[in-house]
Image (tube, coloured by chain):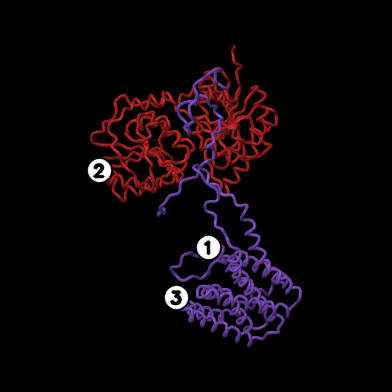
Chain colours: A red, B purple
Amino acid sequence: MAEPKLRVLMVSDFFFPNFGGVENHIYYLSQCLLNLGHKVVVMTHAYGNRTGVRYMTGGLKVYYVPWRPFAMQNTFPTVYGTLPIVRTILKRERITVVHGHQAFSTLCHEALMHARTMGYRVVFTDHSLYGFADVGSIHMNKVLQFTLADIDQAICVSHTSKENTVLRSGLSPGKVFMIPNAVDTAMFKPADVRPSSDDVITIVVISRLVYRKGADLLVEVIPEVCRLYPNVRFVVGGDGPKHVRLEEMREKHSLQDRVEMLGAVPHSRVRSVLVTGHIFLNSSLTEAFCIAILEAASCGLLTVSTRVGGVPEACTLFSIHTFLLWYYRMTWLCLLSQIRMTWYEQSKRRYQYFQVLTRRRCTIE
Amino acid sequence: MDKNLAGDSTPRPKWRKVAYGGMQIGYNDNYTDETFLGEMVMNANVVRRDLLKVMKDSVSISQYLCIVALVVLVWVHTLESSLDENSLLLLDLSLLALGFLVLLLTEEKMLLLRYIANVSFFTTGLYVLAPVYQTLTRSISSDSIWAVTVSLLLLHLFLHDYSGSTIRAPGALKSPSLTSCISVNASVVASVFVASRLPSRRHVFAVMLFSLQVFLFAPPVTYCIKKFSFGLHLLFSFGLIGLTLYSVYALHILFFVLFLVIVVVVNVVCPYWLIRMQEYKFEISGPWDEAKLCFDITD
């Protein structure tokens, strides 16, 4: 018997043309749902001149509602201002399930609230970890308690994230499903010819250069490692406020030939940067579920990461190779012989998108 | 949704806290293990406070309140002309000498030098500028002056740095924060406004000298006393509170009652309230917390 087809509305402030974890997640999930025969519509705010209705690959309809973002990519929170447009979209597209993403998105909270008022099924996915102590977090958690008070299911991307969400929102743990993120292994394939590791070992870092992603740790670690191991070079991709500190570090220790700064790397070029390296370094101070590690492992790199948040759960059994980067001293292990295809196959098996979204569909039903 | 087959004899494998490997057989996605929230730590960094210690610490707050109350009393008496300029000048000199003595006895060389330098500097300045202050607010009505003075004093009390002195010796731990600078400025402006209502230049000079002396030097001097000996600090504070209460009583009974209530609230009610609220403290930490860097970021 054919299963009833769902008509899903994905709501978030974060979508294409922005690139990031949440945006890619929404996009890939929508594509997989479309492949399974369901209908997906995405609602987000306008990006510059990009307003109105656009169609993306596979017939994905995106509503770029004509509001400007006012702070940190979020629309201005007018509680009842979004009701007309949300109702119009819900009725016109004959939506059955509303799926909100990211606790930090005001549009998501408002849409979920209006959908629930009108009696629709509502699912919420949280992608980040938040604290409890500072003013911003306290406010966010309070808003989250309101939104999640009357929700059907919530999805978290790791067990640590589930604990964090349950504590923040006061939901019963039985309502929170743990479904990890997935990586597109068709895009993140290892290189056909592996870079030789005889003379130079390349360490790749691709992240936003902000405090939260551990850019200050990089500033301390890179000179130490370069000093201890003369055959190592670094490739740093990404941009941000801490770019200046990294440049200063390069100047101070004269590492211009050993540390290459690529600047912002477009998402399409990330794989080509990753396959030039042997090791991937992730120094973030907090991660709900680090997709960057998976992308790197899928490309055949060895991953070294800080043991924070959901990272210990996401690492595979080969975790003897996943070091603990405590302080700025790193224990270095020999790493030369690595069967990279094993990494690729492991990732492929473990994180197939189809598998992931089947679980998602089950929660919705 | 449950995939357990009827008559399945093999027990399901142990649940693991991992994100890879797909759905764990025999467990739903919303399965909550006994280890859920097992790594949460509550109230790890909370300071447990003792009632007596908090009450002793709150004495420095009421001491400063008394100092400000005494300044206001002197202003009131000067404005009513019950205190003439000669006795005021005498008061100034004796206070200066007292401060000097305290700093000498507690052996604060740095503060002493800065004290002498500052005092000589602004005494000269004040004497020269006294005519300016006298005619400064001639066109403003008295009501506005009293209203502004009271609000500035309240602002000063609200933003004052009660934990340390605003004038610190160089090389001290904490530099003055923005709020303490604002509070000092507020008190100085309040004294200027009050001084501008006085009849003669000598009055203006005496009152300005008195106010500035107290507002600028009372914090470091009391800090020195506290550092030197806590018992002496307590004795000094209680003496000051007694003196203030007596003077306010002599002024008006209503203000006396008000001041007494404030002192009791600051010294007794607030510490007790703080200790009572401690039991509601709920600080959560766990594996989801952001990692703290163990080194300082030096730019």
Tell me the residue at 64%/78% (across/down): B134
| Residue type beneath disc 2 | Pro
> Dividing the image into 4 quarters, which one contains the N terminus of chain B?
top right
Front-lying residue, A361 or A135: A361
Disc 3 with disc 2 on a shared chain = no
Q: Quadrant of residue A363?
A: top right
Residue that carries the numbered disc 2 in the rendered image? A230
Mark 1 touches mark 3? (CB < 8 Å): no
Q: Chain of mark 3?
A: B
Asked whether residue A137 is in view, the answer is yes
Single out the residue that lies furthest toward the top: A1
Residue B48 versus residue A7 in the image, above or below: below
Where is residue A22 drawn, in percent x and y?
Answer: 51, 33
The disc placed on residue B177 is 1
Residue B90 versus residue A317 in the image, above or below: below
The disc placed on residue B110 is 3
Mark 3 touches mark 2? (CB < 8 Å): no
Q: Chain of mark 1?
A: B
Where is residue A100 drawn, in percent x and y?
Answer: 59, 32
Name the element at disc 3: helix
Tell me the residue at 42%/44% (across/down): A214
Tell me the residue at 39%/28% (across/down): A298
| Residue type beneath disc 3 | Met
Residue B122 versus residue B261 in the image, above or below: below
Give the left or right position of residue A181, taking residue A345 as reference.
right
Front-lying residue, A331 or A54: A331
